[in-house]
Image (tube, rainbow, N blue to C red):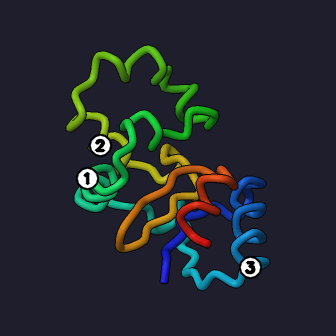
């Protein structure tokens, strides 16, 4: 069963969960604000995903903008970025899907269809 880190007030998360239900894909929902991934989990998810680390950041989030991370991230090491991500679930791109074989960030229906159907 896949794990889906979501935020209950996120419209993209709601759309993604609806898609999972419609396609009868079993999943466990984890509240990313309350139970966000820790540093070790994020390192593992990043490695497993094959994605650029920037894809793990919620670039449209308020905290991202307030911290002016678009300017700071290019100067930070991967370790520093992962440590930062681990401090607050609201910095993490959602929904974050974690399965044994893959990790997905955000809801891109074609990408999800390819991996989940």
Mark seen at residue 82: 2
For marks 2 and 3 on the same chain, the one whose residue lies earlier in the sequence:
3
As rendered, which of 14 and 68 lies closer to the eye? 14
Q: Residue 41: x percent and y percent? A: 29, 61
Q: Is 98 situated above or below 94?
A: below
Foreground label between 2 and 3: 3
Question: Tag 1: Cα neighbours inside 10 Å, few (<14), some, or many (≥20)?
Answer: some
Task: Give left or right: position of 99 versus 117.
Answer: left
Mark seen at residue 43: 1
x 44%, y 49%: residue = 88
As rendered, which of 116 and 1 lies closer to the eye? 116
Disc 3 secondary structure class = helix
Q: Quadrant of the C terminus?
A: bottom right
Residue annotated with mark 3: 21
Contact between marks 2 and 3 (CB within 8 A): the answer is no
Q: Residue 106: x percent and y percent? A: 59, 50
Mark seen at residue 90: none
Foreground label between 1 and 2: 1
x 47%, y 39%: residue = 55
Contact between marks 1 and 2 (CB within 8 A): the answer is yes
In space, the residues marked 1 and 3 are separated at their CA atoms by: 29 Å
For marks 1 and 2 on the same chain, the one whose residue lies earlier in the sequence:
1
């Amino acid at each position: 069963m896949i794990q889906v880190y979501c935020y209950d007030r996120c419209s993209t998360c709601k759309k993604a969960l609806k898609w999972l239900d419609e396609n009868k894909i079993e999943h466990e929902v984890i509240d990313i604000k309350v139970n966000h991934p820790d540093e070790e989990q994020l390192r593992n998810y990043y490695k497993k995903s094959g994605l650029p680390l920037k894809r793990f950041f919620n670039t449209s989030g308020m905290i991202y903008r307030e911290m002016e991370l678009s300017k700071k991230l290019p100067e930070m090491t991967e370790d520093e970025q992962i440590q930062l991500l681990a401090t607050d679930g609201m910095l993490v791109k959602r929904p974050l899907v974690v399965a044994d074989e893959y990790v997905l960030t955000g809801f891109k229906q074609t990408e999800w269809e390819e991996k989940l159907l």
